[in-house]
Image (tube, rainbow, N blue to C red):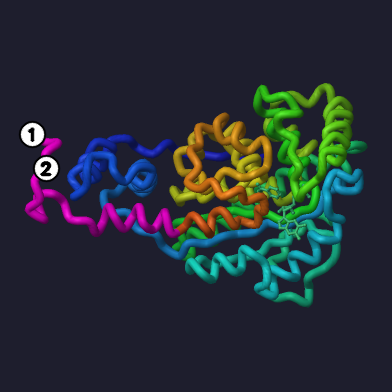
Amino acid sequence: MNRWNVIAPDLGLAAAITQKIDTKTKPLGALGQLETLVHRIALVQQTLTPALHRPHVVVFAADHGIAQSGVSQYPPEVTHQMVRNFAQGGAAINVFCRQNGLDLTIVDAGVRGSFADLASVRNEKIAEGTQNFAHFPAMTTAQCTEALERGARLADELHASGCNVLGVGEMGIGNTSSAAVLMHRLTDQPLAACVGRGTGLDEAGLTRKLAILTNAVDAYPTVGSNPLTALATFGGFEIAQMCGALLRAAEHRMLLLIDGFIATAALLVAARLAPNVLAYCVFCHESGEQGHRVLLAELGGEPLLRLGLRLGEGTGCALAYPLVQAAVNFLNEMASFASAGVSDDSAT
Ligand SMILES: Cc1cc2ncn([C@H]3O[C@H](COP(=O)(O)O)[C@@H](O)[C@H]3O)c2cc1C
Ligand SMILES: O=C(O)c1cccnc1
């Protein structure tokens, strides 16, 4: 049984952080969302001089039984093939992590086939993909618990290595289906508002995906809004490992970079288990996947970027990271009205 002890950041520093932001040489509020961002980071770190150390993106990969039902534009083999691509440095997340100086770890959380030949793929395999939840629960309770724990242990290791910024991403053909059903189960949203085109289904494909998922959800009338039951029934091993990593990283007071629809669905599960996790999050972007906007609103998340990305892999985290750096840097490096001898009209 996993237990999570995520403590809400102490708000005692809040007024001093606001004061430090407001005395910088700029009109009041003029750095917009960067101001709310650094306020949050300073609270997470409980300091007026926040710092970002060894920022890290972890891509959790796993196969999904539901992919066999034809809910994705792409075949299930792509999950395994893309893990090989990550290991060779050729995917979008590799490019953006290199560009912005983020470390990257690739985790096999439950992909079909072996990566024993690839030293750079971390083996956290729970099983060779989940069961197809159109017919059976995706995982057993024991598998779900193990996946959460493996994600948590990875967060422990990153924390111990000096990392204080964790971005989570994923790869798993079919996982927008898992994410959509989790969203439907754990919010009051109708399934149709949660299901989107994923990798690019056309209108007919979307209609078919919704019908398959509607039947699947109807097959589990007793699965209510219990987060662990929903996660085990409809989740993926990568979603469960992301969830465990987010929860443990928040316990360590690390800053959490949240990517697109699937990562946000993992966060939704985490937030239902430990609501304080939300205070540690940076919502990096609003994905093009229909459902993400509403999911962000459900969690009170204000995205930094709106680029129409619909990729996952943690790409939104890597792309938003320079904004996180900019927020921290302005708080630490900008002159104040007093130090620069600039008149502060708002004070008079
Ligand atoms: C080549 C390729 C690279 C990807 N990288 C991330 N995804 C994204 O697409 C998948 C989810 O969409 P769906 O539910 O429609 O399958 C996930 O693997 C996600 O990470 C990719 C998808 C493809 C095809
Ligand atoms: O928002 C995402 O993360 C996403 C959307 C579509 C496909 N894969 C990922």
Q: Residue at x 49, y 58 (%)?
A: 159
Judge from the rendering whether residue 199 lies leftward or rightward of residue 314; answer left or right: right
Secondary structure found at label 1: loop
Q: Residue 266 shows which numbered tag?
A: none
Q: Is mark 2 within 8 Å of ligand 2?
A: no
Task: Indicate the quadrant where residue 85 lies.
Answer: bottom right
Q: Is residue 309 left or right of residue 156?
A: right
Asked if residue 17 lies left or right of residue 75, the reply is left
Above or below, 251 against 108 in this view is above
Q: Which residue is mark 1?
A: 348
The crowding category of the residue bearing disc 1, from other C-alpha atoms within 10 Å (few below 14, some 14 to 19, many at least 20), is few
Could you give the CA–CA distance between mark 1 and mark 2, rounded to whole angstroms?
A: 7 Å
Q: Main secondary structure of the magenta part?
A: helix
Question: Residue 175, percent across and down?
Answer: 76, 46
Q: Residue at x 29, y 55 (%)?
A: 330
Can you give x and y, in whole percent of width and height, for residue 149 in the image?
A: 65, 49
Task: Give the residue type at disc 1.
Answer: Thr
Q: Are marks 1 and 2 in contact (CB under 8 Å)?
A: yes
* Residue 4 placement, left or right of 206: left
Q: Residue at x 29, y 49 (%)?
A: 47
Extreme residue toward the front, this view: 203
- Whether residue 277 is visible here, answered yes or no, is yes
Q: Determine if the magenta segment contains residue 333.
A: yes
Cβ of disc 1 within 8 Å of ligand 2? no
Residue type, numbered disc 2: Asp
- Image coordinates of residue 65 in percent, x first then y, are 87, 47
Residue of label 2: 344
**Quarter of the N terminus within the rendering:** top right
Q: Look at the numbered disc 2 and give the secondary structure of its residue.
A: loop
